[in-house]
Amino acid sequence: MSSKVTVVCNAGPLMVLAKLNVLHLLKELYERVHIPQTVYDEVVIAGLRHGHKDAQVLRLFFQSVAWNPEEVDSSTIPDVLRHAGLDVGEHDTLALALSLSPSLVLMDEYAGRQVARRLKLPSRGSLGILIEAYREGIISAEQISFYFTEIVEDQDIWISPQLVNRLRREILGER
């Protein structure tokens, strides 16, 4: 990944990568990832309040890499984003990405990625992060296959098993 591109991440990929115990891939692939305060509040503060183990993992990871959550300046948000019907985390992720342009948006939610496309912001989801790590030689074929299996079998990860299996075939030639 080019160091000239700023990376902004929404909640979905953070939670998936925490559940898989591969948050380090963000640091290895992108060096620095920006996280809106609302996303941090969702995945860490609310997650800890609800007893989610991945929230503790995320809190410790953010501390270790010194990535602090960022407030979003709502005064510069374009109308297309204001009226997109997204949740606050997706909204703030896209708003922060626009303010830090050029940006790559890490987001799993389909509606949010559609809005990102309309805003000319490239996006990548959790599976795309894993595939990029594989293509960069950071993880092996065996590791990505294992992570794909974990995603399919983990009831707390809401990614389509059909999509995972299609990508497994395309990337690894597995059945």
Image: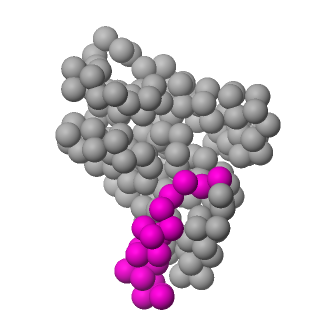
As drawn, which residue projects farthest toward the top? 75
- Between residue 169 and residue 70, name the one nearer to us: 169
Q: Is residue 16 above or below residue 132?
A: above
Q: Quadrant of residue 116?
A: top left
Residue 164: within the magenta? yes
- Between residue 145 and residue 114, name the one nearer to us: 114
Q: Position of residue 129 (x, y in %)?
A: 46, 60
Q: Is residue 119 above or below residue 127?
A: above
Q: Position of residue 86 (x, y in %)?
A: 38, 30
Q: Quadrant of residue 169?
A: bottom left
Instruction: Please indicate, yes or no, whether residue 69 appears anywhere in the rendered image.
Output: yes
Task: Please give left or right for residue 31 compared with residue 124 in the image.
Answer: right
Residue at x 54%, y 82% (from the top left corner) = 141
Residue at x 60%, y 73% (from the top left corner) = 149
Q: Main secondary structure of the magenta part?
A: helix
Question: Magenta region: which residues?
Answer: 156-175
Q: Is residue 22 above or below residue 45?
A: below
Task: Please give left or right for residue 135 compared with residue 17 in the image.
Answer: left
Residue at x 22%, y 37% (from the top left corner) = 119
